[in-house]
Amino acid sequence: MARRKKVYEGKAKILYEGPEPGTLVQYFKDDATAFNAQKKDIIDGKGVLNNRLSEFFMVGLGNIGVPTHFIKRLNMREQLIRACEIVPLEIIVRNVAAGTLSTRLGIEEGTPLPRPIIEFCYKDDKLGDPLVAEEHIIAFGWANQQDLDDIVALALRVNDFMSGCMMAVGIKLVDFKIEVGRIWDNDMHSLILADEISPDSCRLWDIETGKKLDKDVFRRDLGSLTDAYTEVARRLGVLPTNSGPVTRPTLIN
Ligand code: CDP
């Protein structure tokens, strides 16, 4: 018999019904996918690390007043979150040229951008999450102009906070993706930060060496993804610096 009802299963996470109405349990899997799931693998310990790292960032953002879906971590792979209506957009914030920005516009990877650039992609795996303009978003009703203004303000606050956290531990925040959701109060809604913030959805480069500490390690076969994420977690103080490799007992709480 199933322990609880699965609400949704994505590439890296599963959502289960939560203990109270309006809550969900978010479970972090070890599955890694890239290039719209054309490259797949199981990376032992990745889900444990992302659960901890996402908790770290969401709690920090909550402390500076950014509304998030995070309620509390339940165990090494699960966190309790507020249910929300996900806006079907991937919101990408870039500080340095990389990835599709570099290939699309021919800007060399590593070129600092004159200001943070925010891009919107329509969340649809079948279409490969295409880049869309604000015009499309509003015309097709995925979000309204007020939502977009709020999303830009929220994304820039997340960028400032995350850039500072990373800079303090010698890591450059090159770019990242966030998702937001709506919380309804009668016919009014507000937006909260949802999904996850982890090295799966960021580009993180060591400031000194340029070493990649994010999912590009997996995408581009650059070594051990668990080692890279463990290093990020250790530098941020999320894992004790003297703990051994990421194993289940190390992260039991
Ligand atoms: O990562 P990729 O080169 O496919 O696309 P990008 O547009 O350069 O991605 C910008 C940032 O958003 C990177 O940090 C990606 O890891 C993240 N992203 C993500 O987390 N999920 C996606 N579906 C697309 C991008």
Image (cartoon, rainbow, N blue to C red):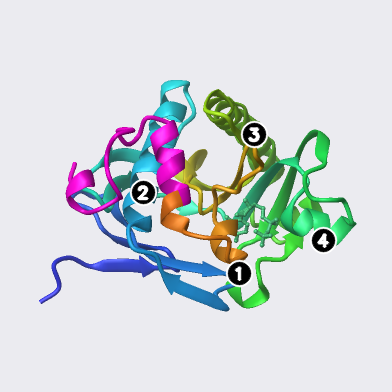
Q: How far apart are marks 1 and 3 (CA)?
A: 34 Å
Q: Tag 2's secondary structure? A: helix
249 part of magenta stretch: yes
Report if the beta carbon of the residue with label 4 is closer than 8 angstroms to ligand 1.
Answer: yes
**Depth order, front residue of 76/6:** 76
Instruction: Kindly identify the amino acid type of the residue bearing the numbered disc 1.
Output: Asp
Q: What stretch is highlighted in magenta?
A: 228-253
Which of labels 1 and 3 is toward the front? Answer: 3
Nearer the N terminus, badge 1 or badge 2? Answer: 2
Nearer the N terminus, badge 3 or badge 4? Answer: 4
Nearer the N terminus, badge 2 or badge 4? Answer: 2
Q: How far apart are marks 2 and 4 (CA)?
A: 30 Å
User: Does any portion of residue 195 appear in the rendered image?
Assistant: no
Disc 4 target residue:
103
Report if the beta carbon of the residue with label 2 is closer than 8 angstroms to ligand 1.
Answer: no
Disc 3 target residue:
207
